[in-house]
Amino acid sequence: MRGARGWVVLLLGTLGLTSASAKTKLMVWGMAVGEETKGLEATVREFERRNPDIDVVMLSMGAGQMNPQKLMTSIAGEVPPDVIRQDRFTIGDWASRDAFMPLDDLIRRDGIRPEDFYPACWQEACYRGRVYAIPYGTDCRALYWNKRLFREVGLDPERPPRTWEELYDYALRLTKSNPDGSFARIGFIPNFGNSWLYLYSWQNGGEFMSPDGRTCTLDNPYTAEALEYMVSIYDALKGAEAIGAFQSTFQTEALDPFYTGKVAMKIDGNWVLNQIARYAPDLDFGVAPAPVPSARLRGEGRFQGQPPFITWSGGFSLAIPRGARHVEEAWRFIKWMTSLEGWLVLNEAQREYNRSLGRPYVPNMTANIKIDEEIFRRFDPENPRLRRALRTFLDLMPVSRFRPVTFVGQRLWDEHVRAFELAIHHKKTPREALQEGREKVQKELDKVFQREEFPLLDWRIPLVVVAIGVVMLWGWAWWALRRAGPVGKLLRGEALAGWLFASPWLLGFLLFTAGPIVASIIFSFCDYDVLHPARYVGWNNYRELGRDPLVWKAVWNVAYLSALGIPLGMAVGLGLAMLLNAKVKGMSWYRTVYYLPSIVPAVANAILWVWILNPEFGLVNSIFRQTLGAWLGWEAPKWLSSEQWSKPSLILMGLWGAGGGMIIWLAGLQGIPQHLYEAAELDGATAWRKFWHITIPMLTPYIFFNLVMGTIGSLQRFVDVYIMTGGGPVDSTLVPVLYLFQNAFQYFKMGYASAMAWFLFVIILVLTLLQLKFAPRWVHYEGG
């Protein structure tokens, strides 16, 4: 009897384990879990309770704008997540690559009503008449103003600026300077907060794409007027460089410049209300629609019949990547997360969490009109300022605009940012900057629409070429072995053993190094975006390289950095080595101290120097102001915020790691025979003559090595530039590898990026060969 009961228990346990193991693991990307996401966690837990067959696994994966490299890799590798929370403005871009599933059939089946959503939110999730995502949260922009600062300068705290003209006037009146001329406060910075040129253009009647999506209209006259207006405010406030230096002092959270009174007005999103509730609950502020051109407010001319104020909304959506394994479960999750019940669970849990910490709760906006109405009926903030501000954002949503849904959305965004920077720094007029950006975007549009004209790559041809190359290589190896003459059995055995031991490395080299190298050569003659088959375009990528001004800008930047940075770095390294070559007590400790900076991780090093070179409170400028600034009245450099000083900043930072080269120089110095110095002293040589006629000639092999390696390293520079400047300001620090990275992993122009990689390889190869060619004329080896 006991035995039978045991078998039953074992059988039931086995069934239970089988049932547990059969739970579907639903992989969700882009939803960050942290201290401030109690509502999200509660919503997901409730979904799992209602769906016991599903276990949700959430990964942030760079939540916010989804990390494109990881997403592209997962889809190409056929291991995509089941659900992704994606920035809505990128939906069209990904949908054009067939990266997301169309959801129309599921929407019709389950009765999802597009009219329940804000039009801007729903339309932004559609591409070419099909729906690729369900809008989740949303946001919009409005003007925040500090009422206390309005009172301080004699402005009516209850009357914010309503027109561009008033905004310009208020910005100047609210700006305050320190005795040394630096900013103590700025009234308004056109691009601080979250407005960008998009909002100003829409306010002025501008557009960025034609209705059919085939033509970029970035340089239309209304957008140009909007950019001219933005430039006028920067110019009136001492210029973009001075404002950029002031902005570099801005902090986040409790030290946000709007909360601390460093900025009197800003255009920003509704999400700021929750931050105010948390960090500045006593802030006396107001929210109103962003100021517009006076003609729009009066409804004159082209604005007749249009609303006096508009806003710009963005936000996130939930999509199912192509190749997802659990489509039905993913759809159930999306429906729950965008349902009224799901949002009520989220807001209830988040409000309780906020109350437990003694701070107000401001609900976030959803993309669903009816859900918003219910949420704000139940969770309206108790604080009247927050309540009025939130109502302002809700009232603006029906007149919201959204970024164009296009497969060149990321490129359009980047070019509109570049045009803005070129204009405010007066590198080009607003119209010229916008025209340059339009041409680049239009080129990408035309290329995609003309893609069908190019044939699909016939892989048989490159494979045959590669096979012929391999056969020729083996033939040469066989010929070389035959020329070496017959070998004995013992030597053959040793050779076989050597090949066997080396085979793991050789296999890895062929698969992970040689293979990608050959593939990049092939792709450099193709139009390839990873998810679509490659199309053969011949030499088009290389011809485009020659016509791309940013390529030559990047080459000039790296030439500048190399021409000044390499000799200076070598000189500093040699100088340190000569100081540390002395035989004094504690020298090993000094050598360690000088070497340590060279082993600091590159990312930490870059972040450290961003602080050191901060133009307002950085260590370098603090010393500068107390010395040269105080004695001679010189203005401290703006460093990374300045086009003129950005490259010298990178060179200065490079000297921080001179300790790495110092070790090589030190080895060279200690290898110089001492009798040479003794003989020179007997002949009455001075210290300079000994250095010039003995030290330098004997170190020429080390000079040559450092020169070659420094040249290669400089041309491959990436990490510090990517973190510190992103290539700015106005492309003054754009380097080839950074531009290659942008084309490969932001625009997914893998063919163009491959061509750029080979272009860079040729430059490095030519420079190295030239150095090797001329080395015998000046490099002296001992005994040579």
Image (cartoon, rainbow, N blue to C red):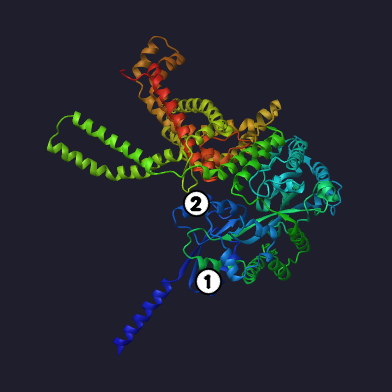
Q: Earlier in the sequence, mark 1 or mark 2?
A: 1
Tell me if I can see residue 38 in this picture.
no
Q: Residues within 10 Å of mark 1 (few under 14, many from 20)?
A: some
Q: Tell me the kind of residue under disc 2.
A: Met
Q: Residue furthest left?
A: 489
- In the rendered image, which residue does mark 1 sit on? 48
Tell me if I can see residue 255 in this picture.
yes
Comparing 89 with 7, the one in front is 89
Q: Residue furthest bottom?
A: 1
Please determine whether, in this image, residue 438 is positioned above or below residue 126.
Answer: above
Q: Quadrant of residue 111?
A: bottom right
Image coords of residue 306 (percent x, y): 80, 53
- Quadrant (top left/top right/bottom left/bottom right) for the N terminus: bottom left
User: Which element type, helix, strand or loop, lies under badge 2?
Assistant: helix
Comparing 654 with 641, the one in front is 641
Q: CA distance from mark 1 to mark 2?
A: 28 Å
Residue at x 71% of width, y 48% of height = 195
Check residue 658 in the rendering and tell me which mark sits there, or answer none: none
Image coords of residue 684 (percent x, y): 42, 10
Q: Tell me the kind of residue under disc 1.
A: Glu
Please determine whether, in this image, residue 111 is positioned above or below residue 90.
Answer: below
Q: Quadrant of residue 41?
A: bottom right
User: Which element type, helix, strand or loop, lies under badge 1?
Assistant: helix
Comparing 684 with 615, the one in front is 615
Residue at x 73% of width, y 44% of height = 190
- Quadrant (top left/top right/bottom left/bottom right) for the C terminus: top left
Please determine whether, in this image, residue 239 is positioned above or below residue 161.
Answer: above
- In the rendered image, which residue does mark 2 sit on? 72
Q: Residue furthest top?
A: 683
